[in-house]
Image (cartoon, grey):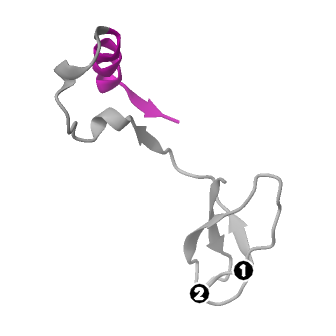
Amino acid sequence: MPRYEHQCILHKCYFEFEVTYSIHDDPLIKCPKCQSDTKRLISKNVRFETPIDVDWEKDPSDLSEKSFKSYQKAKKLKYRW
C-alpha cells in the first residue's frame, strides 16, 4: 500500500508524519500529537535505488553471460520517480 505524508493544520503544531492506506480509501486522518485534522501533502521526489546499489556479496563472474550484462546495466541505473 502507498504511504502518504500528512501535516497537522493546527497553527501551533504543524506536525508532519506518514500514514499507509489504500489508494481507494479517503480516511479522515487525525494528528497523532494533538488529534487535530490534517491535510495530505504532495510528496517530495523519492529516489529508488536498484538492488545492485547495495554491496554485491557474491562474485559477479559466477553469473551467466546474460545475467552479468543485466548486472552491469542495472549497476549504472538510478530510478527517480
> Circles 2 and 1: CB distance less than 8 Å?
no
Residue pointed to by mark 1: 30
Question: Which kind of residue does numbered mark 2 sit on?
Answer: Lys
Q: Which mark is residue 12?
A: 2
Look at the picture and state if 37 lies above or below 70.
below
Q: Main secondary structure of the magenta part?
A: helix
Q: Is residue 52 left or right of residue 48?
A: left
- Marks 2 and 1, the one that precedes in the sequence: 2
What range is drawn magenta here?
Answer: 66-81
| Helix, strand or loop for disc 1 | loop
Residue 55 on the magenta span: no
The N terminus appears in which quarter of the rendering?
bottom right
Which quadrant would residue 55 be assigned to in this image? top left
Q: Is residue 50 left or right of residue 15?
A: left
- x, y (%) of residue 31? 66, 81
Which amino acid lies under the numbered mark 1 shown in the image of this protein? Answer: Lys
Residue at horizontal 56%, vertical 78%?
Answer: 15
